[in-house]
Image (cartoon, helix red, strand yellow):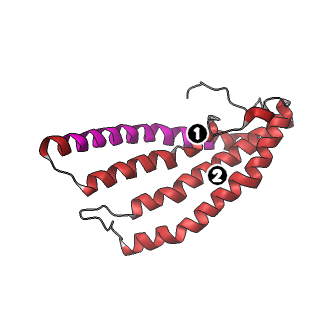
Amino acid sequence: MRGLLKVCAAIDVLNVGVNYFARWLVLAAILLSAGNAIVRKVFNYSSNSLLEGQWYLFSAVFLLCAGYTLLKGEHVRIDIVASHLSRRTQVIIDIVGTLLFLLPFTAAAIWLSWPQVVSKMVSGEVSSSAGGLPLWPAWILIPVGFSLLGLQGVSEIIKRIAFLTGDGPDPLPTHGSQI
């Protein structure tokens, strides 16, 4: 179990690192959005590539930070019933939910998006908008983001099993903690 917990730690560090990178993407998206708005209002000029750049940056942040959000326990939960159950039962529910829903969904998203990603990369497809950006960088974010989310799901399962076997601490994150 100790070796698996080291794998968990590596996955957690990966998602924390991606989160730190994505913070800069948020800043870039804000600056691009503000610059685009200013140019549009002051100079009465707009560019499809600027608008698409904003969309790409926001998409990148959303997709790349899904794993980190899972790590921090900030995904949507329905705790009305679970909050009244024991910690052990809550952990078992998390394991079952991750195995039955999260991991199959991430695998399906990667599997189904990959042919499109390859097709867009090979063809060099560009947005149909005048002055639009290449599409493949945005499409690559889909399997990358879901891979990070799936890896974090595996990490969370291992941490919960370690908790159930007495080999690890309580894996349920405390809200408001920062990394």
Which quarter of the rendered picture does the C terminus lie within? top right
At horizontal 65% and vertical 39% (from top left) the residue drawn is: 9
32 with respect to 165 (left or right): left
Front: mark 2 or 1: 1
Secondary structure of the residue carrying numbered label 1: helix
* Mark closest to the chain's N terminus, 2 or 1: 1
- Residue 4 visible in image: no
Please tell me whether residue 72 is drawn above or below residue 148 in the rendered image.
above
Residues in magenta? 11-38
Q: Are marks 2 and 1 in contact (CB under 8 Å)?
A: no
Q: How crowded is mark 1: few (under 14 residues within 10 Å), some or many (20 or more)?
A: some
Q: Mark 2 points at which residue?
A: 150
**Three-letter amino acid code at disc 2?**
Gly
Secondary structure mainly formed by the magenta segment: helix
Q: Where is residue 164 in the image (x, y as percent from the top left)?
A: 85, 36
Relative height, residue 118 to residue 18 (above, below): below
Counting from the top left corner in percent of width and height, residue 151 is at 64, 50
Quote the CA–CA distance across marks 2 and 1.
12 Å
Q: Label 1: which residue?
A: 69
Q: Say which of 42 and 165 sits in front.
A: 42
Q: Residue at x 60, y 61 (%)?
A: 109
Image check: 43 left or right of 173? left
Q: Which of 85 and 27 is in front in this view?
A: 85
Q: Residue at x 39, y 39 (%)?
A: 26
Q: Is residue 41 magenta?
A: no
Q: In which quarter of the image is residue 82?
A: top right
Furthest toward the left, the residue is: 43
**Mark 1 residue type:** Thr
